[in-house]
Amino acid sequence: MAIYLCHTDPDLYEHDADVVAVRPGAVALSRSAFHPGGGGQVSDIGAIEWSGGRAAVTHVELDGDTWWHVLDDATAEPSGSVQVTVDADHRLGVASLHTMSHVLNAFVFDEFAGALVTGAQITGDGKGRMDFDLPEVDNDRLRALTDPINAVIARGLTVDSIYVPVTEATPESGLMRSKSVAPPPTDDGTFRVIDIDGVDRQACGGTHLTNTGQSRPIAITKVENKGRHNRRVRFQFADA
Ligand SMILES: [Zn+2]
């Protein structure tokens, strides 16, 4: 994967850019702080403003190396220099649930002998789910993970992103936790690894908090059996 601007500068929510391509209702930019989505999380939303107009960005569509910022106005014709705004509340919500999905994943990995993730989805409505390869497990043990996750939020742990060589990301390292949403390496042969202090380290290309204390408390709302091998854990903000 490429290293995104939102990876190197996670607090950048407003910046200038130039329009490099347009199609009806969408625009590609010279630079963008948006996360384009992928790996189980929705893209950022926001807005762009140009001389004579403004439109909301509803999502990003990837077309090879081109990021189409899809606008809510199909007749909009942005051109030249534009002002880009990433919706900070939406980013925080998705990054919170995404970061807590790593914590959930860490507890499941520890408690159930290295169980792997088979799918994940974080949506913009304050909800998420993770699927685990867990053939034999008492679902009540999964439901009971709400309190330990909220304890990690309460402790306010630092969340770092670091880059490690592909050669270190062996199956035994525990860094590759997913059967389906693992990111490809960067062009220089490294993986981006998210390190939640003392709790979890795993490769990921999504958006995350910089401290677990930034998240509102969460609640595991449902555990479902999805086939003989899969458990689906649904979670959301406790106050949602
Ligand atoms: Zn992640």
Image (cartoon, helix red, strand yellow):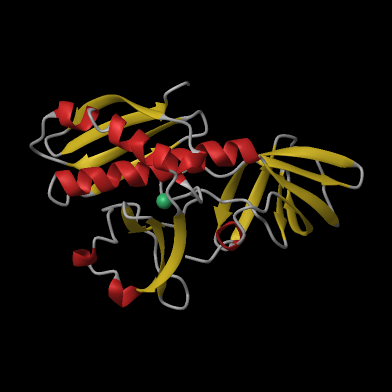
Q: Residue at x 32, y 53 (%)?
A: 200
Q: Quadrant of residue 111?
A: top left
In this rendered view, identify the residue nearer to me: 93 or 45.
Answer: 93
Q: Is residue 129 above or below residue 31?
A: above
Q: Residue at x 40, y 30 (%)?
A: 218
On the picture, is 145 further left or further right than 111? right
In the rendering, at what x and y percent does residue 23 appear? Answer: 72, 50
Q: Quadrant of residue 108?
A: top left
On the picture, is 218 further left or further right than 16? left
Furthest residue toward right: 52
Furthest residue toward front: 155
Q: Is residue 240 above or below residue 135?
A: above
In this rendered view, identify the residue nearer to me: 108 or 149.
Answer: 149
Q: Is residue 127 visible?
A: yes
In the rendering, at what x and y percent does residue 6 appear? Answer: 59, 56
In the rendering, at what x and y percent does residue 117 appear? Answer: 26, 47
In this rendered view, identify the residue nearer to me: 101 or 43.
Answer: 101
| Number of callouts | 0
In the rendering, at what x and y percent does residue 130 appear? Answer: 31, 38
Q: Residue at x 58, y 63 (%)?
A: 8
Q: Is residue 118 visible?
A: no
Q: Is residue 234 above or below residue 50?
A: above
Furthest residue toward left: 136
On the picture, is 4 further left or further right than 179? right
On the picture, is 63 further left or further right than 131? right
Q: Residue at x 64, y 40 (%)?
A: 88
